[in-house]
Amino acid sequence: MSSVATDVVKANRSGFAGACFASRRWQIPESRSMLAMPPAAAQALADLMPLLLCGEESAEFVFAAAVPELPKRVDPVLPIELARIADDERRHGMYLSALRSRLPPPADRGATRQATRFLRKLATTDLGVHLARVAALDASFCQVLAEICRPGTEIAAVPELAELFRRIRSDEGRHVRVSRRCAAALGVTAQTEHAERSWVVREFAALMTAATPAFAAVGVDMQRLLDRLERTSTRSAARGSG
Ligand SMILES: [Fe+2]
Ligand SMILES: [Fe+2]
């Protein structure tokens, strides 16, 4: 383990992450009540939750595992940023699980099975490539969050929900930039990064397309979402998640 990574691990053990990032924390208001949404929209959001949770838990472990693997001469900020992302992902998972508890049960387990299959496809033993894939997944997720929070959707009509998704989107945009930098530090070329991104976004778009009726029920135009994903797949890596 590099000395920088060791410092990060020590810092986390001593509560560094909690102290440094406490001001950035945000809690979804605790309530046992169901969200104030039309029943059909609440059911559709419940059916979409496995897709929205896609990657949160697995990403937490990827980022935590990446810290000791970075080369010793890497920018010392990167391991700290990775540790911060692992913390974010843990928090996102908690928020989304809390949200799920305020929704009806999913109509079936189809979305869960599809999300699991998708995540299995992303698995690789090459950590750099895995980070490039996670960057592409987070960039794609940002596009979904942007569309579901657009004025006029059922999510935009519930302020606490819109705020939750906006905050997660803000975090994910940072994750994309840090993940790409770490992938490059681990030897992933721009050409490989582009190829991986195109593949991941295409697979992600197929996953979302299968849920078109649920997206429509919360007011998301699937063609707009697919157009956003297409732009994500082709844009230059230097432009971030946009
Ligand atoms: Fe996340
Ligand atoms: Fe993320």
Image (cartoon, helix red, strand yellow):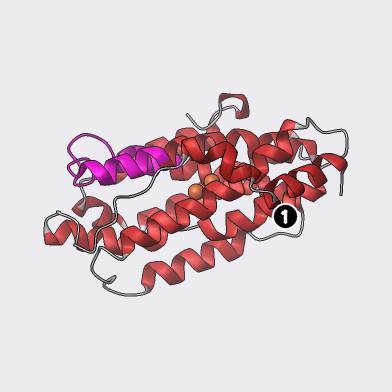
Residue at 27% x, 52% y: name it: 215
In this view, the residue in front, 148 or 227, is: 148
Say whether residue 65 is left or right of residue 133: right
Residue at 38% x, 67% y: name it: 111
Q: Which residues are magenta?
A: 142-167
Tell me: residue 96, above or below residue 73.
Answer: below
Residue at 87% x, 42% y: name it: 3
Residue type, mark 1 in image: Ala
Q: Quadrant of residue 94?
A: bottom left
Say whether residue 149 is left or right of residue 50: left
In this view, the residue in front, 75 or 17, is: 17
Tell me: residue 33, above or below residue 215.
Answer: below
Q: Quadrant of residue 5?
A: top right
Please name the residue that numbered disc 1 is placed on.
Answer: 65
Residue 189: percent from the left, percent from the top? 76, 36
Say whether residue 41 is left or right of residue 233: left
